[in-house]
Amino acid sequence: MATQNRPLSPHLQVYRPQITSVLSILHRITGVALAVGSLLLVYWIIAAAVGPEAFATAQSLIGSVIGRLLLFGWTYALFFHLVNGIRHLFWDAGWGFELKTVSLTGWTAVVAALVLALIAWGLGYWQMDLP
């Protein structure tokens, strides 16, 4: 039989990634990142409750370059998950399934999440009392 050599289901190497599939995967990844990032937040809160030495250690970890990059990634994940979730709510209502609209709202979600994360970080630095 010639059909035995055929793949049983579509494979990722066969199809070109589309905005819908990439953003669906990114939505799931950001959901996991939010859960893992919440553990860092819990660590910081517990360190504050334990005492000044533990809190200073947590602050030095979170305040490091790697810590700040993780926090920015977590902030982006938060805003992307929010914006893309709103996009999905519109889909649940039956709006936005045209190919042009799907692409436009997908890219809007990516850019809006980045802009919102930059605004949040910019406002945070603007309100800090730096020497």
Image (cartoon, helix red, strand yellow):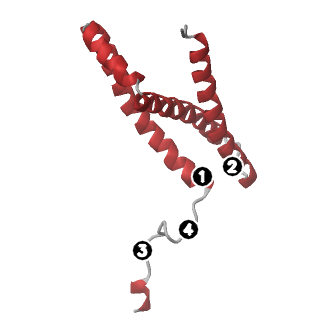
Is 78 rendered above or below residue 50? below
Mark drawn on residue 20? 1
90 displayed left or right of 50: right
Residue 35: x %, y % from top left: 39, 32
Tell me what residue is drawn at x 65 percent, y 31 percent: 115
Tell me what residue is drawn at x 48 percent, y 66 percent: 12
Disc 4 to disc 1, C-alpha distance = 13 Å
Residue 55: x %, y % from top left: 31, 13
Q: Amino acid at mark 2?
A: Val
Q: What crowding class fits label 3: few (fewer than 14 Cα within 10 Å), some (14-19), or many (20 or more)?
A: few
- Quarter of the picture containing the N terminus is bottom left
Q: Quickly name the residue at label 3.
A: 8
32 displayed left or right of 13: left
Check disc 2 and report its element: helix, strand or loop: helix
24 displayed left or right of 65: right
Q: Earlier in the sequence, mark 4 or mark 1?
A: 4
Q: What crowding class fits label 2: few (fewer than 14 Cα within 10 Å), some (14-19), or many (20 or more)?
A: some
Camera-nearest label, 3 or 2: 2
Q: Earlier in the sequence, mark 3 or mark 1?
A: 3
Check disc 3 and report its element: helix, strand or loop: loop
Mark drawn on residue 102? 2
45 displayed left or right of 16: left
Q: Amino acid at mark 4?
A: Tyr
Q: Quickly name the residue at label 4.
A: 15
Check disc 4 and report its element: helix, strand or loop: loop
Is 16 rendered above or below residue 88? below
Q: Amino acid at mark 3?
A: Leu
